[in-house]
Structure formats: C-alpha cells, structure tokens
Image: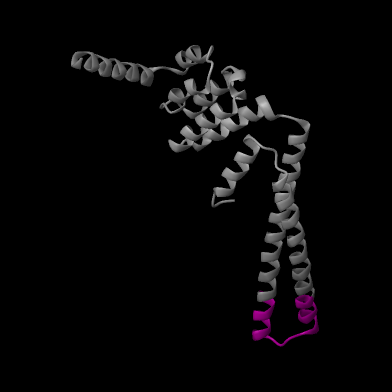
Amino acid sequence: MVLFISQKIKQERHDSEKDEKKSSRDWAKDLRNSKTPRDFLTPLLSDLPFLERTELIRKGPAAIFKDRDEVLWLENQVISAGHFGIAKYIRYIQYLVSYNSEKSREWCHKFVRTDIYGRWIVQREIFVREEVEALRKATEISPLTAEIVSEIDAYEKELVALNEKYWMYYRKSWLMEQNMPLGPISRAVKDRRKDDAW
C-alpha cells in the first residue's frame, strides 16, 4: 500500500513538472477538445506569458464558456491566484459567447457615458472650487473689485448647479446598476468598483 501511494505521488509530481514545461502550442492541442473550463486552470496559472494564456482562452471551445457555474469557478480560482487580468479576459469571452446582445451592449454604452458624465461633474466641481479659493486669496492681497465679486458669485451659482447635476447623475447611475445585465457584465462592474482607481 505504501509503495502504491509513493508511486502515485511520484507520478503526480512528474505530471506537474510536465505541465509546467508545456508550451502554449502543447496546451492549445490539449485544450482543443476540452469539455469543461476546469481544464483551463493549470495553463492559466502557469508561467506562460499573459498574451499566450489569453490566446488559449480565445481559441478554446466556445461551448464550454456557456456553463455559468463552471466559468465562475474558473474565474474565482484565477482571481484567488492573483491573475486579475486573466479573470477579466475570461469574463470578456463569456460575455461574447453567452451574453452578447443588443440590449447588453446598449446598457454598457449608456453606463460608460453616464460614468464619464459623473466624472466630468466631479472634475468641474474641483476646478470651480479651486478658482473660488484662488479669487478669495487674491482679495486678501488686493482690494475686492466688482469684477471679482461677480466671478465668485457666478462660480458659486455653478457649484449649486453642479451639485444638482451630480445628484441627478447619482440617481441615474443607481437605477442603471439596478437594471444591470446579470453575468460577466455585473461581475466586471463589481470587480472594477473594488479598484481604488475607480
């Protein structure tokens, strides 16, 4: 019994070492007839260059990316190993294979445009606040003129308008998220929101 276990461990090590030495062509051949996303885990966690790993996913059988639970399992394994770029690519391929519809493309387009608009509002508010502060500091050095007063008033009115625009944007963004298509799109948005750079 001990001999059997020892041989089995040696065989597993040997197989593991062979897997680590495989080229992307070897993996592509092995994965061509794959029936499950689980078969992709070892090559995706290997030391192959990023582009070669994405190429394996792209050239793999599209049908396996229709199994939502299995793809989610693969995505979670890849994320756990710290390969976030590969996880994004898995979501992208799953989207193309199973979720690519006019409705989802339209939602994505509107979501991106809404997000850009919200960022513009925030950037404009920062700029206006800095301008008001600069004008107020200028009044400490030189006397207050009617022109400076009218500029400050105009900027303060713009700040009020920007605040209203922001809350309208916020409500629209919240409603869009409530109607977000399920699947890889919602996982991608949630994953992106975790990023500090968001």
Overall secondary structure of the magenta section: helix
Q: How is the image coloured?
A: one colour
Asked if one can make out residue 103 in the rendered structure from this viewpoint, the answer is yes
Compared with 46, 174 (above or below) is: below
Residue 116 makes an appearance in the image: no
> With 132 as the anchor, is 29 left or right in this view?
left
Indicate the position of residue 27 as horizontal and vertical percent values. 46, 16
Q: Quadrant of residue 108?
A: top right
Q: How many marks?
A: 0
Is residue 86 depicted above or below 55 in this figure? below
Quarter of the image for the N terminus: give it.
top left
Q: Is residue 150 left or right of residue 20?
A: right
Q: Work out whether 142 lies above or below 166.
A: below
Q: Quadrant of residue 155?
A: bottom right
Which region is colored magenta? 134-153
Q: Position of residue 66 (x, y in %)?
A: 62, 24
Which residue shows up at 71% across the image and 55% down it? 118
Residue at point 50% right, 37% down? 84
In the rendered structure, the answer to whether residue 59 lies left or right of residue 26 reads: right
Residue at figure coordinates x 23%, y 13% from the top left: 4
Residue 89 in picture, x, y percent from top left: 57, 31
Q: Give residue 192's position: percent from left, percent from top.
A: 58, 45
Residue farthest toward the bottom in the current orientation of the protein: 143
Q: Is residue 56 magenta?
A: no
**Residue at (76% x, 53% y) in the render:** 172
Quarter of the image where one finds residue 167: bottom right
Along the line of sight, the residue nearer the viewer: 4 or 102:
4
